[in-house]
Amino acid sequence: MTDQQALSPEQLVQAAKAGDVDAMYQVASILGAEGHKEQSVTWLKKAAGNGHGDARFTLANFYLKGINLERNVAQAITILEAGVKSWHMPSVQLYTALVAQGAGTERSWTKAVDLLLLSAVRGHSPAMVELAFLLILAQAQTDLATELMRAAACRKNLHAGLYIASTLSEDSEKDDHDIAAYWVGRALELGHPNAEKYKTLAGAVKEPTMDQAPLPAFDPDIVKTSLHKLTVWTPKDAKTIMDRPNVKKIEAAIPLSICAYIKALSAPRLQAATEYDMDSGEWVAHSQCKGFVASYWQEDHNMVTFAVADRLAKAAGADHQFAEQFNVLAFEEEGQYLPRIDFVDPDLPGSSENLTRAGQCSHTVELILQTADEGGEPIYGPTADSIDTADGDILILRNLLSDQEPDDQAMSAILPVKKGQKWSALRLIREKKQDF
């Protein structure tokens, strides 16, 4: 391999033509940045075909998202499988989540968990964090979850470090206090959305190292049994809050630490809410959602975000394949979601095509990630009745009557935030499988 940093663009091209795969990937990146799409893809495919892990990962993402290439999920899976064989960790992580969802490949939670365990055992800190959060969601082996988080925090993982900060007590070991002090300090520097609440823990300490927290030993069969619980979860604790529109609530359905994790993952992805204007054919500012949105499509999930999105579908009694994308919403002061209906009105233009493609919208499911200090309450029905909620609660609005006709009272909204921020996650459940 050549020292690419010392090469000019012309020399990089020469090295790429001579068979240097790193140079091929670098040339593809440069051409892409300059807007030469076809040439960039050509070099990217050459690098991927010659075994360059990052090139294969990038090419797979192009196919998954339809960027620079026609969308082809099956082709993306084939490329990622090559990355899995060579243990290219970003490829393994993405492939694992796609297998769990059944996106472009046979759906297998068991296979996905096997890959996640192998990644964690190999010392991949994001896999340790995902495994730990899945155990927390399953309410199983919480001591192992903490050990995994500690090990990940000592392997440069910010999410794990903030989790350790959230669990500190007077009885915590000094190492845990030092881990928290370091990562809270880093999180404050980076403007992390969860850092402010722990700012008193920040301190001038050295970065934690691997020798402070070896990889914990665990029985994989016991872990697999624990995580199987996530696949059979049912909303048995749902309480009816309103009869019409029919609204149910599941309290503490998602642990607070996972709510914070989803916020942290979503913050860099947030964009001002938009909607498609059929008259102009352009995306315009959303007429009802006065906030920010981070959308998770198949290729955006990891095992934790998928497990949470899956739980929102299960809360409505549906398989995740019948749910639209997982949207995280954030509202600053004065932000709100104006009253809306989510069922498809058959009398509106374009409704026939919508119903044929996806079926009626039977439920609107909302996860409360963070309540605002003041305002931001969810309201339902034409009388705008508000509902008391806490972080981690799931709300299920049924949009249809018992005869499966749309309920014209199935309205929902989020009141203006007066102080602080409001964060939610939203999924719409449809009558037909969603093919994204």
Image (tube, rainbow, N blue to C red):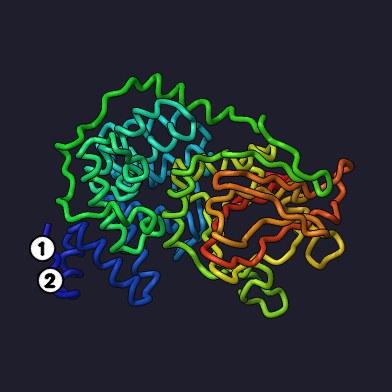
Which numbered dot is residue 7? 2
Cα separation, mark 1 vs mark 2, equals 7 Å
Q: Is the N terminus in the top left, top right, bottom left or bottom right quadrant?
A: bottom left
Circles 1 and 2: CB distance less than 8 Å?
Answer: yes
Residue 192 horizontal/vertical position (percent)? 36, 59
Q: Circle 2 — which element?
A: loop
Left or right, residue 228 beside residue 177: right
Q: Residue, x 46% and y 54% (percent of image)?
A: 263
Left or right, residue 6 beside residue 325: left
Which numbered dot is residue 274? none
Mark 1 sits on what residue? 3
Residue 343 horizontal/vertical position (percent)? 77, 55
Direction right: furthest residue:
403
Q: Residue, x 38% and y 47% (percent of image)?
A: 79
Q: Amino acid at mark 1?
A: Asp
Front-most of residues 359 and 41: 359
